[in-house]
Amino acid sequence: MTAAVSAEDRAHYFELVGHGAEVPAVDFALALSERDVAPQDILLDLVVPTQARIGDLWARNEWSVAQEHAATHISDQVVAALATRRRAEHAGRRGVLVVACVDGEWHALPARLFAEVMRWDGWDVRFLGASVPTPHLVSYLHRHGPDVVAVSCSVPTRLTSAQRVIVAAQDAGVPVLAGGAGFGPDARWGTRLGADRVAADARHAVEVLRSWPSPAVGDVGAVRGSFVSDDDHVLIAKRRPQLVATAMAELAQRIPAVARYTDAQREATEYDLDQVVEFLCAALFVDDPQLFTTFMSWMGTVLTTRRVPLSAVACVLDTYRRELYDFPRALAYLAAGRLCLNETGLEAGAPKSAAAV
């Protein structure tokens, strides 16, 4: 019986990561391996929860971007060290698995971690890294003929790219496993976009892939055929520059300080406004308002902890609702997002008048 990662182990590892102690952190992970903790458990029960905690600390403005990047680098080094120290037994006995991030997805660590877990489970893994252009991925699939391609998406705004990959891979005769936070709770949007299988996390993926290539649940062709997205997300995406410019002008009128922003402040604000439109388009694409409301809750937390008045965000949502009057679904999603933003502000202790303007 293998040993398990304990709460004390996680606390000690987090302390090392928090101090940027790369070598001690890697040595600690390797020591756990020598203590007979399975390498996949070190990644899934030590590294993954630590990364989730770090992301939450950044969102709550308790960690800087620099600290988050340093910690992610350490986690990446832990993955590399374990992969080098603990070679997979019977590698390739299950078949060839290609792992790639969709085009525009730069969060490679989750996919790399997943790739090593699959390698230890007996797959011959070909990890292609971050942001793989769809034509290049398809060319690779045609050339090497893997048994499965695992598509990683961490941010929902890349779901349109993910669908292109899913369709292109299946047209090339390669079944697709979809996974990553970008596919939503239980990877539900991967199913909606027609992936042959989906996995909520790496452990679930191990179970799913061990049953491959038994028939998938349901008819994939029927799933793909039933997914019909209107053009709302495309039309609104084309209006992003106009929407952002209008929202910035409205903010400057409502909040005089905005008119005096430095170039850096203005650029950061425009980026946030653009993100609101991007997540709205992604939600419209998969026809699920939860995608947008979840983002608005997260954004509310991020902005509240940075002392940005949520009334400013409410103003932006109202501006978008005015501009998108001829898109009924978008109006409904924006209204739901505004309500969610209000609730987030109240939970965070923001004054009711500011959260509900």
Image (cartoon, rainbow, N blue to C red):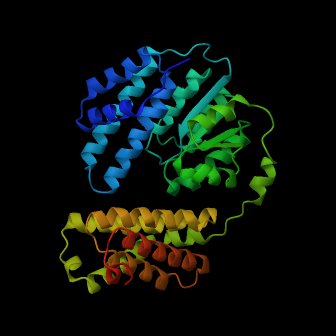
Vertical order, 203 against 190 (above or below): above
Quadrant for the C terminus, please. bottom left
Residue 309, position in %: x, y?
A: 29, 74
Q: Based on the displayed image, in which of its 4 quarters is residue 200 positioned?
A: top right
Nearer-the-camera pick, 236 or 311: 311
- Residue drawn at (77%, 60%) of the image: 226
Total numbered circles: 0
Q: Position of residue 14 (x, y in %)?
A: 32, 36
- Quadrant of the snapshot with the N terminus: top right
Query: Vertical placement of 76 versus 296: above or below?
Result: above
Where residue 110 appears, x then y in whole percent?
A: 47, 38
- The answer to whether residue 286 is left or right of residue 36 is right
The residue located at (23%, 66%) in the rendering is 265
Q: Residue at horizontal 46%, vertical 69%?
A: 277
- 267 relative to 106, above or below: below
- Relative height, residue 280 to residue 243 (above, below): above
* Left or right, residue 254 beside residue 158: left
Q: Is 41 in front, or is 92?
A: 41
- Left or right relative to 17: residue 103: right
Find residue 212 and report its image quarter: top right
Q: Residue at 46% across / 63% down in the picture?
A: 295
In the rendered image, residue 347, in percent from the top left (x then y), is placed at: 39, 69
In the picture provided, is 274 more to the left or to the right than 41?
left
